[in-house]
Image (spheres, helix red, strand yellow):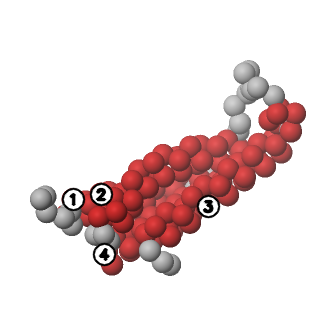
Amino acid sequence: MGTELNILALYGLLVVVIVVLQVLAAMGQVGLGALLSPRDDAAPLTGVAGRLERALQNSVVAMALFGPAVLILAFNGTTTGATLLAAQAFLIARVLYVAAYAAGIPFVRTLIWAVGIGATAFLYYACFAAAPPAA
């Protein structure tokens, strides 16, 4: 599946896909006119549209956590087979998480989320464990 940086780029593309899916679901629920308005008094989205909106917000937070760890590892040249495996696990977990969230499968969704956040935590651990010695 490539390097950790490739996986970061793939995750960025996944977030773009989630944005498009969320907009399409919202448009189906409230119409294009509502989406083009300032939405100052918009009703909250429900059903799949609401779940995709929340999955998108969670995905952006996950990107904010995952991205720096990958960039630190790449910048320091400290990527390993284990960090690649963790990045792959993160990406797979995030794809499954969005699907489970959109489908409304709560317990499984939480377990999948735990895999993704665990993989992210491992990447940060790897940042410190393999850090080059201070000069």
Instruction: Give me the C-alpha separation between circle 3 and circle 4.
Output: 24 Å
Task: Give the residue at mark 4.
Answer: 80
Residue placed farthest to the front in the image?
A: 135
Task: Give the residue at mark 3.
Answer: 13
Confirm whether residue 107 shows in the render. Answer: no
Task: Give the residue at mark 1.
Answer: 128
> Disc 1 residue type?
Phe
> Marks 1 and 2: CB-CB under 8 Å?
yes
> Disc 2 residue type?
Tyr
84 or 24: nearer the viewer: 84
> Marks 4 and 2: CB-CB under 8 Å?
no
Task: Give the residue at mark 2.
Answer: 124
The x, y position of residue 24, in whole percent, is 78, 49
- Relative placement, left or right, of 10 versus 4 is right
Neighbour tally class for label 2: few under 14, some 14-19, many 20 plus, Cα within 10 Å: some
Q: Which residue shows up at 28% across the image and 69% down it?
A: 78
Neighbour tally class for label 3: few under 14, some 14-19, many 20 plus, Cα within 10 Å: few
> Marks 3 and 2: CB-CB under 8 Å?
no
- Relative placement, left or right, of 54 versus 118 is right
Where disc 2 sits, the SS reads helix
> Marks 3 and 4: CB-CB under 8 Å?
no
